[in-house]
Image: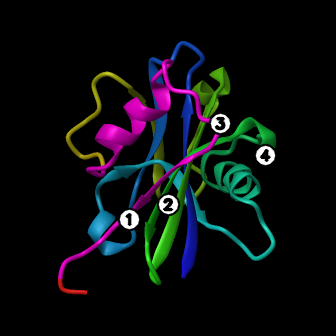
Amino acid sequence: MIHYVTGFMFSKDKKHVALISKLQPSWQAGKLNGIGGKVETGETPQQAMAREFAEEAGIETNPDEWKLFTILTRPDVYQVNFLYTHDDRIYSAKSIEKEVVDIYETDALPGSVIYNLRWLIPLALDEHLRFDKQIEIREIREGF
């Protein structure tokens, strides 16, 4: 199973989020997603998120700044750890690699966002939820 991280850096007022325009994999090409990538051997999701955010958005963060709130798993295929942080350094995010990083309004996400961001972003922003433990979601595809 491949382990990934996807992170959302929100402004402190929660009005903006940094997203990346994906080139790969093909099903994500041209769509906006959170910033992230593969978890390397020996890394925690928070360490992987801090590394990926620096590599893709040019902002150095500490792993303890990232809060794990949801784990999405397709058994025997992949696991995606979703994390968030609130930091006004979001406004200095820049594109480091070929994929373009930009800032978007959280209450007016563009139509090109990956479908699950429409519920993951509000979930991460909900002040009434306390993430003492992450939510675990298991994807089941019929016919498998």
What amino acid does circle 3 point to?
Asp
- Measure the alpha-carbon separation of dots 1 and 3: 34 Å
In the image, residue 3 above or below residue 114: below
Q: How many residues crowd mark 2 within 10 Å: few (<14), some (14–19), many (20+)?
A: few
**Chain-order first, disc 3 or disc 2:** 2
**Chain-order first, disc 1 or disc 4:** 1
Residues at marks 2 and 1 touching, judged by CB atoms closer than 8 Å: yes
What amino acid does circle 4 point to?
Pro
Residue for badge 2: 98
Q: Determine which of the numbered discs, if any, sits on residue 23 in the image.
A: 1
Residue nearest the observer in this picture, 44 or 11: 44
Residue for badge 4: 63
Would residue 131 be counted in the magenta stretch?
Answer: yes
**Number of marks drawn:** 4
Q: Is residue 4 left or right of residue 21?
A: right
> Is label 3 in a helix, a strand or a loop?
loop
Task: Single out the mark in the foreground, 3 or 2.
Answer: 3
Q: Residue furthest bottom?
A: 144
> Is label 1 in a helix, a strand or a loop?
loop
Q: Position of residue 25 (x, y in %)?
A: 38, 72
Task: Single out the mark in the foreground, 2 or 4.
Answer: 4
Q: Residue at x 60, y 29 (%)?
A: 90
Q: Determine which of the numbered discs, if any, sits on residue 55 in the image.
A: none
Q: Is residue 99 left or right of residue 43?
A: left
Task: Single out the mark in the foreground, 1 or 3.
Answer: 3
- Measure the alpha-carbon separation of dots 4 and 3: 17 Å
